[in-house]
Amino acid sequence: MLDIKQIRENPQLIQERLNSRSGKYDIDPILHLDRQQRELEVTRSQIQARSNEIGKIVGQKIKSGITPQDPEIQSLRDEGNSIKATLSELEPQEKNLKTEIEQLILALPNLPSDSTPVGKSEENNVEVRRWGDEYIAQSPDILPHWEIGEKLGILNVERAVKVAQSRFITLIGAGAALERALIQFMLDLQTQAGYLEVSPPLLVNTASLTATGQLPKFAEESFKCADDDLWLIPTAEVPVTNLYRGEILTAEDLPIYHCAYTPCFRREAGSYGRDMRGLIRLHQFNKVELVKFVHPSTSFDELEKLVGNAEAILQALQLPYRVINLCSGDLGFSSTKTYDLEVWLPSSGKYREISSCSNFIDFQARRADIRFKEVGKKGTQFVHTLNGSGLAVGRTMAAILENYQQPDGTVKIPEMLQPYLGREVL
């Protein structure tokens, strides 16, 4: 959530930064309501001060011997009662204005950072680097991963559709084992890198989704339980970030690094007709997530380290990839700066997103009220939060099936995964 003080003091800069994003955002209604609220606050404060003054005067007069029935005291009390009636009208008006302002601010995305390229679409994203060109398969006969999986009998779509609907998939035998091995491998690598593993709830309340920025704007992307204030998580970012909601940490607590494996659930609204086959765009998918809580002075350095932690998985698996710095128009709602990792899928001859690593600065922490206190400094500060996929498991599996496909139709298992599976070939 943006800071109303920042909006008030730098309206032109805020509007320019918002205009660099996709979509249309107008802060004028917020500024208008803010002026109303502050004027009302001044009026209420002045009236409250007069009410306090009357109470003091009445007390002094009674103490000096004037009877409570004295006309002067009665007049003061009448004025005080009138003020109380006025205050009882002003206070809810001010509260309603504050609520309306907050709801408008909740609908505004984060501001792009100075190091985020300005652009309106993914075509304006900037490639930072590539890795693993020497591992790109040269065969023109590589099958898409879903065909490989079906031929090997490790992936079944029809039965998953029968059980649920489209955009679900069932992994069988070695396919299920490969996914499990990938999850364990990713968790092992990230815990060795200093992340503390957590296993959070898969259902979260509305406050949790609001805190990380999925609500109110993206309600249509999430699955909600009909009879409870509970939603299926779209990513472990939501429950892990909210573990600290409403808390005041100490500077010594920071940085906090967590990793978590969870199933994730997304409606993929607006993506119908895209990636209808395979493991790329499902309603249910597995992911290992990396979440950081850090001091504001280190968050952009921590973002670079976070990207490196995600890259380490791809490099260990020897999967070719590239790193992309997303432009302002392609940023996620809560992010100020994002790097996407895109893995090479030879069947389509394209790089496809496999991890998105973002710095949210204080955007989520302000919504979630996650602060910290430094010794010797007055007050508290909001922490900075970051997260990234380390990695999306299904997409990693898709990349392995395609990049490690052999001429005889088998799939070689990456060397780093062989101890987890106890086999060399699928």
Image: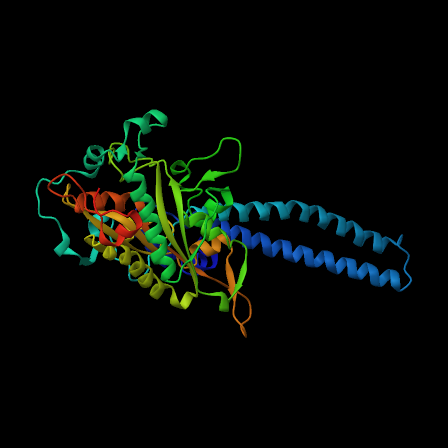
- Relative image position of residue 180 (x, y in whole percent): 34, 45
- Relative image position of residue 398 (x, y in whole percent): 24, 42
Left or right of residue 196, residue 315 in this image? left
Residue 424's place in the image compared with 274, above or below, is: below
Left or right of residue 94, residue 396 in this image? left
Is residue 326 in view from this perspective?
A: no
Is residue 135 in view from this perspective?
A: yes
Q: Which residue is painted at 33% across and 37% down in the image?
A: 268
Residue 233's place in the image compared with 390, above or below, is: above
- Relative image position of residue 415 (x, y in whole percent): 23, 53
The image quadrant of residue 144 is top left
Q: Which residue is painted at 28% across and 39% down in the image?
A: 175
The C terminus is located in which quarter? top left
- Relative image position of residue 353 (x, y in whole percent): 25, 47
Q: Nearer the viewer, residue 164 or 155?
A: 155
Q: Nearer the viewer, residue 13 or 171?
A: 171
Q: Which residue is painted at 47% across and 46% down in the image?
A: 210
Q: Nearer the viewer, residue 179 or 71?
A: 179
